[in-house]
Amino acid sequence: MQQPEYSDKEILRRLYDYTKPYISYWTMAIICMVIVSGLTSLQAYLIKPILDEIFIEKNEVYFAYLPWAIFVIFLLKGICQFFYEYYLNRIGQSMVRDLRQEIFEQIIRQSLSFFHRHATGELMSRIFTDVALIQEAISTAAVGLIKNVLQIVGLVGMIFYLDWRLALFCSGFLAISFLPMVIFGRIQRRLTTRLQRNMGRLSTATHESLTGNLIIQAFNAERFEIGRFSDVLKDVFRNTIAGVKAKSLSSSTVELISGIGIIAIIVYGGGRVMAGESSTGTFFAFLTALLMTYQPIKGLTQINNAMQQGIAAANRVFWMRDHQPEIQNKPHAEILPAFTREIRFDNVRFQYPGGRRTVLQDVTLTIRKGQTVALVGHSGSGKTTLANLLPRFIEAEAGGITIDGMDIRAVTLSSLREQIAVVTQDTVLFNGTVRNNIAYGQPDSPPEKIIDAARRANALAFIEALPDGFDTAIGQSGVRLSGGQRQRLAVARAFMKGAPILILDEATSSLDTVSERAVQDAIDHLMEGRTVLIIAHRLTTIERADVIVVLSEGRIVETGTHAQLLAREDSEYRQLYKLQHTLSDD
Ligand SMILES: Nc1ncnc2c1ncn2[C@@H]1O[C@H](COP(=O)(O)OP(=O)(O)OP(=O)(O)O)[C@@H](O)[C@H]1O
Ligand SMILES: [Mg+2]
């Protein structure tokens, strides 16, 4: 799948749009952050009066009031810290909620082919992991950026305020100490890329050698494989060691430069104190503020990583958010009126996207109201595909389908699907009660209607025998029910829907004979008075159909009643029929 890349700028703008509704929280959070960073600088400043006034001057007034001032500062800082963390998390979590909701809404409306292309796991990781990564990026990166920059600005301001000469002197040093970080950082990045590539080679080589082990032994190629493995291993080793060297050299150099810096500060700053140009308190307050900048600077260096991950995740999430369903209402789509006359397939052709061959070709078929039309044919002949065209789960490439003369592409999806009930082999039940599964999508249905649907589907007896009757929870996918019971619930659901058109796809093929009987009775009942498109492998279930349509490799090869088709010597239907009867006679 080719995903369009959004530019970083576009991603940031869209992320910003998501935070916009929470602008009042942002304002509160930023105000609190500004206060916190101001108070942090003040904390460093306090060292000055503590040393100068209390320890050196032994000033009683300061001794009495300064502890209170310190208490107030810490209290205020604590309160503001609480509020900004609270507001930021509210923003982050609100975004997570909004994004998940939007993506889910988008995914649930996608067409069938979308779900063929994207594995469930992939879609789930969009909703869970990627959204969480975005939130992470917002809270650590965006917020970290604002918070750390504010703190650095506050502290650097304090440093200059305390002693601007010493501050200028330090800046020079700081610039020099960044140099090795930049140089070694670049070397490290290069080594990391190479290491990742070599690790990939190592894992491929290992995987191949282990899985191909039979061939390796058959060709006496053990030595060759060992040599190949050891070559890659050597590269990985060399790489790793080089990486370790660069990293340690970098930290040792920084350490050394910081040491020299501290000596220089002591010599220069101490000299100024001794000369009476500055006070002891000022010097230590300065030193404290300087050391306190370490934390936010380190924080800044970690932001890039979270930011990159978040942007990559946002790219995937926004792609999904923008992906329009292939099948949706046309502009000015009409409401399909109640079905009265006939369904027509006109020269329908279909090919799955990316599929190599045409799955349906020249399919022309009329189903009159009240008729039962059976589709038969070998596995892969296109029966399910043909049935899926009618509710527009997929769309014909050429030709068209009309209901009472109206093209199904010109009507709204909901008005079309309202008139069609589908019962398939793999019944989909939801984790909930029997009641909610029967009245699926109609939570406010009257209980009598639900009971009636269950009775008609041969399901009332077993439902009433369940521990809580209609309110029994049936477990994920209905695991607490038997296959036949699940099928009967599906039939009850179709009764409940009351749609005039019914599609039955292999509804009884996975069941044994006894449970098949109960399901078959329910289905026979369901078919009464409806227009039915039925697909079944067991020909006995479709002998009574008004029209039998035989599909072969996507083309209709025969149509007629059971008797007509069986009477023809060379008919494919006769062969299918004979095949099954000899098989079941064994
Ligand atoms: N999602 C898909 N993508 C690509 N090809 C598909 C897809 N689904 C089905 N096909 C192909 O389309 C052809 C017809 O499939 P279809 O499911 O309609 O057969 P069927 O007649 O219902 O078979 P069965 O009796 O086994 O259910 C098959 O060759 C199948 O491989
Ligand atoms: Mg099928």
Image (cartoon, grey):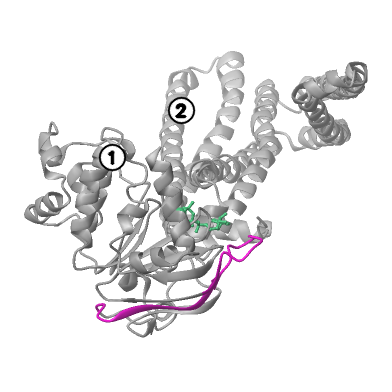
Q: CA distance from mark 2 to mark 1?
A: 78 Å
Q: Position of residue 200 (x, y in %)?
A: 79, 31
Q: Quadrant of the C terminus?
A: top left
Quarter where residue 213 is shown: top right
Residue 483 colored magenta? no
Mark 2 vs ligand 1: CB under 8 Å?
A: no
Q: Is residue 235 left or right of residue 415?
A: right
Which residue, given by chain and number where applicable, does mark 1 sit on?
Answer: 513
Position of the N terminus by quadrant = bottom right
Residue 106 seen in the current view: no
Residue pointed to by mark 2: 74
Three-letter code for the amino acid on which mark 1 is drawn:
Thr
Judge from the rendering whether residue 396 lies leftward or rightward of residue 446; answer left or right: right
* Residue displayed at 82% across by 20% down: 255
Q: Secondary structure at mark 1?
A: helix
- Within 10 Å of disc 1 (Cα), the crowding (few <14, some 14-19, many 20+) is few
Q: Which mark is residue 312?
A: none
Secondary structure type for disc 2: helix
Amino acid at dot 2: Phe
* Nearer-the-camera pick, 100 or 561: 561
Asked which quadrant contains residue 46, the reply is top right
Magenta part of the chain:
338-362
Depicted 192 relative to depicted 448: above or below: above
Marks 2, 1: nearer the viewer:
1
Viewer-closest of 285 and 546? 546
Q: Is residue 504 above or below residue 264?
A: below
Instruction: Say left or right for 283 vs 165.
Output: left
State the image coordinates of residue 330 (x, y, percent, origin top left): 44, 78
